[in-house]
Image: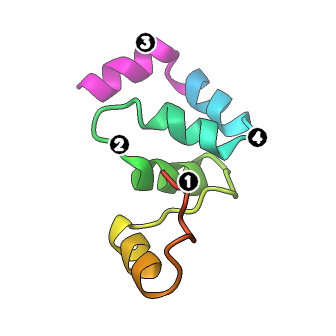
Amino acid sequence: VDTRDLLLKRGGEDHLMKLRSMQDSQAVQDELVKFSGIGRKVADCVALFSLDQDDAIPVDVHVQHIASRDYDPTVFDGAK
């Protein structure tokens, strides 16, 4: 209900279409995580598969930790 109410408050479908037209996938992710229950991975999934954000790359936090631990601890420096 909170997510629905926030989406309606922000403009509903028009807000989503605005997000779709944005060129900055990080800005789209930042907007999506404002919704209750939406974390960075889900935001990236929505951005990639529904909002045409080709630069959004969903990364599971556990995969991120393993890759950082086993391959290169600096690979995800700055990743949110």
- Between the C-alphas of marks 2 and 3, the distance is 17 Å
Residue at 49% x, 56% y: name it.
Answer: 45
Q: Label for residue 38? A: 2
Tags 3 and 1 touching, CB below 8 Å = no
- Is label 4 or label 3 in front? 4
Question: On the picture, is 23 further left or further right than 8?
Answer: right
Residue tagged 3: 9
Q: Residues within 10 Å of mark 2 (few under 14, many from 20)?
A: some
User: Which segment did they paint magenta?
Assistant: 1-13
Q: Distance from label 3 to label 1 (Cα)?
A: 31 Å
Measured from the top left, where is residue 33 in percent x and y?
Answer: 42, 37
Q: Which of marks 2 and 4 precedes in the sequence?
A: 4
Nearer to the camera, 33 or 49: 33
- Mark 1 and mark 2 residues within 8 Å of each other at the beta carbon: no
The kind of secondary structure element at disc 1 is loop
Instruction: Check the image and name the residue furthest to the left.
Output: 1
Q: Secondary structure at mark 4?
A: loop
**Mark 1, residue position:** 78
First reached walking from the N terminus: tag 1 or tag 2: 2
| Residue 22 percent location from the top left of the image | 72, 35
Q: Is residue 62 left or right of residue 58?
A: left
Q: Residue at x 73, y 35 (%)?
A: 21
Task: Point out residue 23 in the picture as x, y percentages from the top left corner.
Answer: 76, 40
Per the image, label 2 sits on a secondary structure element best described as loop
CA gap, disc 1 and disc 4: 20 Å
Q: Which residue is mark 4?
A: 23
Judge the density around disc 4: few (<14), some (14-19), many (≥20) Cα neighbours within 10 Å. Answer: few
* Distance in Å between CA atoms under marks 1 and 2: 20 Å
Residue 11 falls inside the magenta stretch? yes
The nearer-to-camera label among 1 and 2 is: 1
Query: Identity of the amino acid at label 2?
Result: Ile
Identify which residue is drawn at 42% across, 23% down.
7
